[in-house]
Image: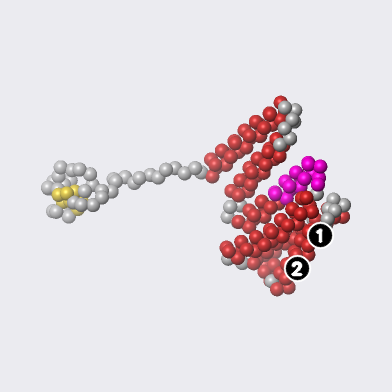
Amino acid sequence: MQYCKKCNVKIRGRKECCPLCQGLLYETEGDENPSFPVLGKRKISSITFLKVCTFLFIASEIVFGTINIMTKGEFSFIGPVMLGILVAWIDILATMYLRNNLIKVITFEVVVAIVVDYYIDKMTHFHGWSIRWMIPMTLIGLAIVTIVTALILRLRLDEYILYIVFDFVMVLLQIIFIRNGENTFPWPAVCSIMFYMILIAALVIFRFRDLKNASEKMFNL
């Protein structure tokens, strides 16, 4: 960088004389800043990322679907793989859309996992592992993860209490499997229902105002 003693200014670049007074310039120490700002590398936008994921999803489904047709369903793993790719794509969509609400993302992921596991159980001669163990244990874990996440994020109870209520509704749906005889070992399901009933009772008794405020916000009462 150059310096003009007469004008008391620093000048970028290499000049033969001061552009103000045409006087003599002197060299000064220090890094020379660029005349124009340096532009950072362009980041991939969320829309572009979504388009890429959608293209890869469609291409993968076409490839595996074609293989399945040409082999006349010889490879039994193709169906679950195609389903897994679909679930992954849905998860990406949900994560991008709900990325500002972590608890909502977790709840959505659990719902998708329950539906997929139940479907896989049904398609593999229905051994019942999904409704006997996976669903009740997953729903209990969901309640714990929801509360822990809320504590870490320092959320108010009225900001996540409705997710607990929604989880309670899901856990009550297990009664359908018990009544129609699909669940031949109902103890885990009954324990999960009992766990949620105790949790909801505690919320209603001790934090009824938060539940009321959350309901008013949701339904604009």
Write down the region rendered in magenta: 112-127
Q: Is residue 157 magenta?
A: no
Q: Quadrant of the C terminus?
A: bottom right
Residue at the outermost bottom position = 206
Residue found at x 75% / y 65%: 195
Q: Nearer the viewer, residue 161 or 175?
A: 175
Which residue is under mark 1?
187
Most prominent secondary structure in the magenta stretch?
Answer: helix
Above or below — where is 168 with respect to 52?
A: below
Colouring = secondary structure
Earlier-in-chain disc, 1 versus 2? 1
Q: Quadrant of residue 170?
A: bottom right
Q: Is residue 121 magenta?
A: yes
Disc 2 residue type? Ile
Residue at the outermost left position = 24
Please tell me the numbered disc located at residue 170.
Answer: none
Please tell me the numbered disc located at residue 198.
Answer: 2
Residue at the outermost top position = 70
